[in-house]
Amino acid sequence: MGIWDKVKEEALNQFIEVIEWLDESKDTILYRFPVHGQEIKNGAQLIVRESQAAVFVYEGQVADVFGPGKYTIDGGNTPILTKLGAWKYGFNSPFKSEVYFVNTKQFTDMKWGTSNPIMLRDNDFGIVRLRAFGAYSMRVADPSTFIKEVAGTNAHFDTEDIDVQLKRAIVTEFSDALGEMKIPALDLAAQYKEIGDAIRDKINLDFKDYGLEVTKFYVENVSLPKEVEEAMDKRASMGALGDAQRYAQFQAADAMRDAAQNEGGGAGLGAGLGAGFAVGNQMANAFGGQQQGSGQQQGGTQTAACPNCGKPNSPEAKFCAECGGKMEVAKVPCVKCGAELREGAKFCSECGSTQEKQKCSNCQAEMAPGAKFCAECGTKVEESAPEGE
């Protein structure tokens, strides 16, 4: 053996006098102090910082757990090590042991979510599929159990090594909690905190076997299928409208107005006619119930339809109880046959004569309805046959 080999061997066999760990990462849960092939000297210093725990493993068994503080390794404060025979050479001799540092701080902003939809029965929508996601915080509550059940002999263990297992447990408990709580889909958003607290209690029952504890659990969102969300939007819209029948009437009236304003010819005229037929169907659906009941109400009582809104009213009513419009319509005689017509009518319903003002064929001056001579030039008005003859 060369001189350099001897120097190297002596360097490796140097006794460890200070045992400590400075964590520079954000996700390391466990770190094994490098004592392989080295011996810990009796009287060595052990420094355990806040949010840490030092676990000594001797001959495959957890010997002792040290919390935050500064310790001197001797038989006085390591009774379990002494019991296991760590000091068989006496207190002045070195001993070999594995030392694990466990990070007991809270690991925050750990994400969870459902990879597949959760099937649940809802009173409003029947069977629904829910997706959810959120975040949680966890820490090592029992370092000894964590090493025995999870970390094992790993020299380094971080959150990624257990993240998948924890997510599976969370999704299982989430599905179970939602099924037991039976919260309607419409009320889920108002119950996120209650759901989170219930799930955290359930998860901790499982995590206890790993030596872990969930300190915070947040439900950020529970989403429904697109079809269910659209149905919820429609229900909300109907609730905001109040009277769905009046809204249908309003929409139909708007459509008729737009069709009436289309004065173009050709394709515009065809579109206007098509819109007119569609609006007619809409109006028939919207007002059909009222038209059928305009003459009678339940029990055979006679009614009169309002000329403005179509709502049935008492025959003696002078104003509509729904819109306040005047129930009576002024009557005027036909300029040709004298039949009573509604004020503003353009043609007579009896003889078909136009009720609009005529123009003199000679001077084009306007003449009063029924005039036989022009008041401007005296030209005699030619009598025309009633329309339809």
Image (tube, helix red, strand yellow):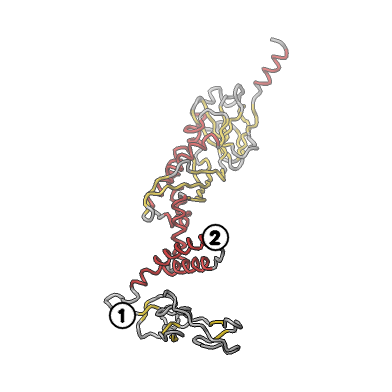
Residue 181 vs 249, above or below: the answer is above
**In the displayed structure image, the side of residue 249 where residue 264 appears, left or right:** right
What residue is disc 2 on? Answer: 266
Comparing 27 with 190, the one in front is 190
Residue 25 lies, in percent from the top left, at 63, 37
- Callout 2: SS: loop
| Residue sitting at x 39%, y 52% | 181
Residue 299 vs 262, above or below: the answer is below
Residue 280 vs 318, above or below: the answer is above
Residue 85 lies, in percent from the top left, at 50, 25
* Mark 2 burial class by Cα count in 10 Å: few <14, some 14-19, many 20+: few
What's under tag 2, amino acid-wise? Answer: Gly
Say which quadrant the C terminus sits in: bottom left
* Residue 302's disc number: 1
Comparing 30 with 97, the one in front is 30
| Residue sitting at x 62%, y 38% | 70
What's under tag 1, amino acid-wise? Answer: Gln
